[in-house]
Image: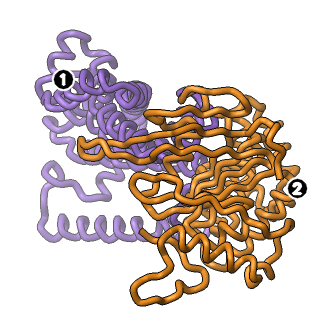
Amino acid sequence: MQSPTTIPRVQLDHIDATYVEDGVTLEALRDITFSVHDDEFVALVGPSGSGKSTLLDIISGLYAPVGGEITINGETLATPDRLGASSYMHQRDLLLPWRSALDNAALALEVHGVSRKEARRRALARFAEFGLEGFEDAWPAQLSGGMRQRVAFLRTVLAERPLLLLDEPFGALDALSRVVLQTWLLELWERERQAVLFVTHDVDEAVYMADRVIVLTARPGAITHIEQISLARPRAREMLTSETFHHHRVALLEALGLLNQPDGAQPAFGARVMA
Amino acid sequence: MSAMLQRWIWPFLLLGVFLVTWEIVVVVTDTPTWMLPKPTEVFTAFREDRQLLWRHTQVTLLEVVIGFGVALLAGVAIGIAIDSSRVLERALYPLIIASQTIPMVVLAPLLLIWFGYGLAPKIIVAALIAFFPITVSTVDGMRAADREVMAMLRSFGANGWTRFRLAKLPAALPSIFSGARIGIAVSVIAAVFGELVGASEGLGYLMARAAPQFLTARVFAAIFILSFMGVGLFAVISALERLLLPWRRYVSDRPSG
């Protein structure tokens, strides 16, 4: 998709990370190198403990790696300097219960110094697009899980950062809301075409959404496989049953060590990676 | 309106039953008024002494409101300070807890020596007693702020003040209100105690003067006023909480996230 001459939105070079548990230093990530360009939707899959979320924490500037360099928009930035350079969305919606849906959506803009009035105006302008019309004044506790997640998405998108970091954004939702929001996010992405780094442990979701799927191993997380997805854009739900989809899925499950299990059983459709 | 009625009918009904029983017991046992007045005699005292009672009520109310106000400002400020710095936490917290072990019985006469018979010693006692629950609840409230929310705000590039303003303080408000409700109730007790130790006005002073004269009905009238004052101030804090934190009514319907 991208031409090799463009500057990547984010470039990771030989990232190593550790974490301390009960006074023991453990390796979390080993020698992670990859990049995400504009117009690129990259998924990161791996078992629990493969350091997927740690990697997003590192890129966002919340966590310092012990080795390697991170370059955002062509600029190599040290750890605290990366804060605010990307839009980071966690698995939990993290809506503030004392703010209305509209004020929650406007939160990132307010942090970036936009006046409250202007932030609310910009959030309101996109409420219908996010399927939230009529819920501007609702408290988060009055919204369904799917709607809360849309508010969190709107908050993330309104920050207008060219790099989106999404940490299992559908992980807490029921299967039906998940499918609806996957399709909705793809439609949104077709319009925006931002650089997206999307963490999931659902192989099907990764193939369906991404241009490229990076597979991490567990403890320490290291890249074992990169799958270039050849499904056409825009994606459609029917592709889930296509030959190409199946081919990518098998390749990824193999990379994750989930095929050729002792009993020879094929993982069921919709299989997720469990540690 | 009917919701209001439903809310208040039960305490009033219970109070009515209590007063009627009291009246009957006093009449049946033929207890003298100076020992235990009948509720009807207390009401007579209310009517006859209303100017006297009102004058002293104003004094006590003033002491309570000022003392509580000082406690609220100091308690929230100290709570924020303790939450913001490990050094301040280690320095302040033990001293604040220790300050609560100083018996009021010892402290009040000392304050009397230092500040005289005026309002100051009562305000100080009320503030000293009330600031502790407010401080503790402020610290707890600040600590209850969601760590992931704080991380999210940092990832947006929010500085410490912005994180405090947008997340920490609002998250702590329900807890601060809980502390304030406890604080207002104990500050009424504290102000009256300050008056009992030495004063020239206030409901505590009035009771201290009336009891030796066997004006027991007047003592009971003062007690009733203090009860209403406590309940009333508590209700004011609760009403403020409902007004300022309208979202609280909807929380706990669904878990967040």
Whether residue B15 is visible, yes or no, is: yes
What's the distance in space between the residues labelled 2 and 1, CA to CA?
Answer: 72 Å
Residue at image coords 24%, 46%? A22
Instruction: Write down the chain letter for disc 1.
Output: B
The crowd level at tag 1 (other Cα within 10 Å; few <14, some 14-19, many 20+) is: many
- Are labels 2 and 1 on one chain? no
Question: Which color is chain B depicted in?
Answer: purple
Residue at image coords 69%, 69%? A207
Question: Residue A191: which disc?
Answer: 2
Q: Is residue B105 left or right of residue A11?
A: left
Q: Nearer the viewer, residue B237 or B166?
A: B166
Question: Which color is chain A depicted in?
Answer: orange
Secondary element at image label 1: helix
Question: Residue B108: which disc?
Answer: 1
Residue at image coords 75%, 52%? A154
Percent x, y of residue B174 = 47, 47
The crowd level at tag 2 (other Cα within 10 Å; few <14, some 14-19, many 20+) is: few
Q: Nearer the viewer, residue B40 or B22?
A: B22
**Position above or below: A166 against B51:** below
Q: Which of the image's four quarters has the C terminus of chain B? A: bottom right
Instruction: Write down the chain letter for disc 2.
Output: A
Query: Picture quarter containing residue B48?
Result: top left
Residue at image coords 80%, 42%? A4
Label 2 is placed on what type of residue?
A: Arg
Secondary element at image label 2: helix
